[in-house]
Amino acid sequence: MIHDFGMIKNLYDTLRDRQTAIRKKIGRPLTLSEKILYSHLAEDLDELPERKKSYVYLNPDRVAMQDATAQMALLQFMSSGRKKVGVPSTVHCDHLIQAEVGARDDLARANTENKEVYDFLASVSNKYGIGFWKPGAGIIHQVVLENYAFPGGLMLGTDSHTPNAGGLGMLAIGVGGADAVDVMAGLPWELKWPGIIGVHLTGEMSGWTSAKDVILKLAGILTVKGGTGNIVEYFGPGAQSISCTGKGTICNMGAEIGATTSVFPYDNRMATYLRYTGREKLAELADKHTAELTADPEVFQKPSQYFDQIIEINLDKLEPHINGPFSPDRAWPISRMREAVKEQGFPEEIKVALIGSCTNSSYEDIDRSANIAKFAAEKGLKAKSEFTITPGSEQIRATIERDGQLEALTKIGALVLANACGPCIGQWKRHDVKSGEKNTIVSSYNRNFAKRNDGNPATHSFVAGPEIVTALALAGKLTFNPLTDHIETPDGNKVKLEAPKGAELPERGFDPGESGYIPPAEDGSDVEVKVDPESDRLQLLEPFKSWDGNDYEDLVVLIKAQGKCTTDHISPAGPWLRFRGHLNNISDNMFIGAVNAFGYDPGTAKNTRTGKVDKISANARQYKSENIGWVAIGDDNYGEGSSREHAAMEPRFLGGKAIIVKSFARIHETNLKKQGMLALTFKNPSDYDLIREDDRVSIRGLKDFKPGVPLKLVIKHSDGSQNECLLDHSFNEAQIAWFKAGSALNLIAKEER
Ligand code: SF4
């Protein structure tokens, strides 16, 4: 089935004209990234956007949400008053399934433990026209690649590895829930116009090297920050030598270098994948638009004129890599690993080897791993490490079961986990080591920060291609190099594993397996969304109160944050993930990691009413109960990090009126504005020093709140003295209307009425 064929055709029909017009305006040929961005502009631009400087509004084609982030996104969407989503959207139940004993039992347990969350997501999806993928149907990015991604499209996903769809030529960007809500409500989405890094691929991979090694190598070159603010655009003859799903793997893990997203140009490998996944007509259509779905030829001829940076990777010479531990950019070519283990003191024994995940569970990946497993089984070998496999989707699982790869892998000892994230996101009840015990695991996943997989800070987690992980599982040692080393068989012989071979796609086509998709009701107006008022995981949102028309007077200072105050300091994840759909409960974590300039333990402050030191969230609750407004003061780049909207919703929910800082991280600043908070900056950053613990502050000038006009802060100190200073802001007219309405959603709801 082809989803949204009409919408895609309409887009393609306009591509040539739009691109010709913009080419003329810019006066030069276009990269693929520019073609897609310009084709999705939501406004006519007077001036051309400047890379890494200008902000533009875009109209994405689609939204995808995973179950952990979808909860608050959909609760917010419900408050918008819209009857249906404005763009095609889907929800995928993949993050909440904990791996322990194997697919069937783990899935059954998740269905019981998360029942109310799943029921909620299913009913909201049904009501508002959102496609719903049940638990067990697969991991968001694999399901999107199989069903929804299309060349030249623009998609937002509430998950960092959304760029996976770049393997099918789509610009797919990971965002916070608030951004997804805007797009689902039919509003344009704001993006800082990115820089573009060109990666020129030449040669062709062979032997043990796989697509994963391209991104493992690139992570080593660019580091975890090197892609920030950029799109990574691949090009060159080597690109065509990589399968569509291999391209997906590379784009997926582009999140690990901080890139906005990554993308490959449309080619015949993508067309083949579209055909195998039931989208023949779409492949035909895309074939006719190849010129619009690839960069202009001049870009390939003189790339340095079009890209901000160019990186060359020769696939002929690319060695398999193993990256880690604790950071995905610690790249070790496999020939250097033995030395690295010795030098760095990494534990040599591999406790667990894990293949699959959204990053590496294509038919090709699993077929190559199964090929190694078959060879090993013939020689009587079994995995020495624990060995798990996480299929990325039910379609993959059913096909590799039918075609025998699962059997080959289980024969050497693999345990098949549910088609879900499991150990990749820390949903793993691990029994073999205790917390704090130093140990090594190696996976074909993407992220390997401390504690990510099992919560154990001493676990040394490495990432590699699935064929390398399979070979390492057989050897049980991180020092094993399958390109050169032998393994001893039970009968005492020494064998060298053969380099893996694998089919790109199943000869007999895909087996869809058990259907996990539930389409939404045609007319969802009668669908009831149930949320138990006693639930501790879900809570319907009450609209925030609109502005009362007066200046804010005599506000208390809740906290004066000092130094780094990221969204993780304001609203961390970890155990709080459970409460992502319950604003009241999750608000207990507000500022729990923030360092208070007035002293005390992180996350605590003096309650200026009682004089006692307490949790910051507890103080805020008390001020709120007494109808006393408060402000939070912050340092530079306040709110950097993840775009999670909880960090903006919680202060608003607990009675905050303004966040006043030296400077903001842009996304968080916008998130605060969306929730109806005043996001303000000291005109003179050193005025931060004027704020004392027992101050009462007033924000004046709100009656004439205008773009570009500063507000005034009057600071009354407890000794009777007083200071005044100016507060800058970046509110435009539309954002001032959000403030006055109480939130952006209130305004949308008002317009809807
Ligand atoms: S498998 Fe891992 S990387 Fe992929 S969506 Fe799940 S948690 Fe994220």
Image (spheres, rainbow, N blue to C red):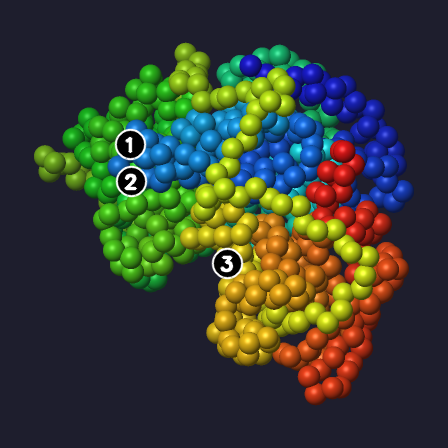
State how far apart marks 2 and 1 are (Cα): 8 Å
Q: Position of residue 401 (x, y in %)?
A: 32, 20
Circle 3 — which element?
A: helix
Mark seen at residue 105: 1
> Which numbered disc, 3 or 2, marks the residue closer to the eye?
3
Mark 2 nearby-residue class (10 Å; few <14, some 14–19, many ≥20): some
Mark 1 nearby-residue class (10 Å; few <14, some 14–19, many ≥20): some
Give the residue at mark 3: 588
Q: Is residue 557 left or right of residue 507?
A: right
Which of pointers 1 and 3 lies earlier in the amino acid sequence?
A: 1
Circle 2 — which element?
A: loop
Which of pointers 3 and 2 lies earlier in the amino acid sequence?
A: 2
Residue type for callout 1: Asp
Q: Position of residue 459 (x, y in %)?
A: 33, 55
Q: Position of residue 689 (x, y in %)?
A: 69, 79
Mark seen at residue 470: none
Q: Residue at x 78, y 36 (%)?
A: 751
Circle 1 — which element?
A: helix
Considering every residue shown, the one lying at the far left of the view is 491
Q: Nearer the viewer, residue 664 or 163?
A: 664
Give the residue at mark 2: 100
Residue type for callout 3: Asp
> Which numbered disc, 2 or 1, marks the residue closer to the eye?
1
Q: Is residue 20 above or below residue 402?
A: below
State how far apart marks 3 and 2 are (Cα): 30 Å
The picture quadrant where one finds residue 663 is bottom right
Mark 3 nearby-residue class (10 Å; few <14, some 14–19, many ≥20): many
The picture quadrant where one finds residue 371 is top left
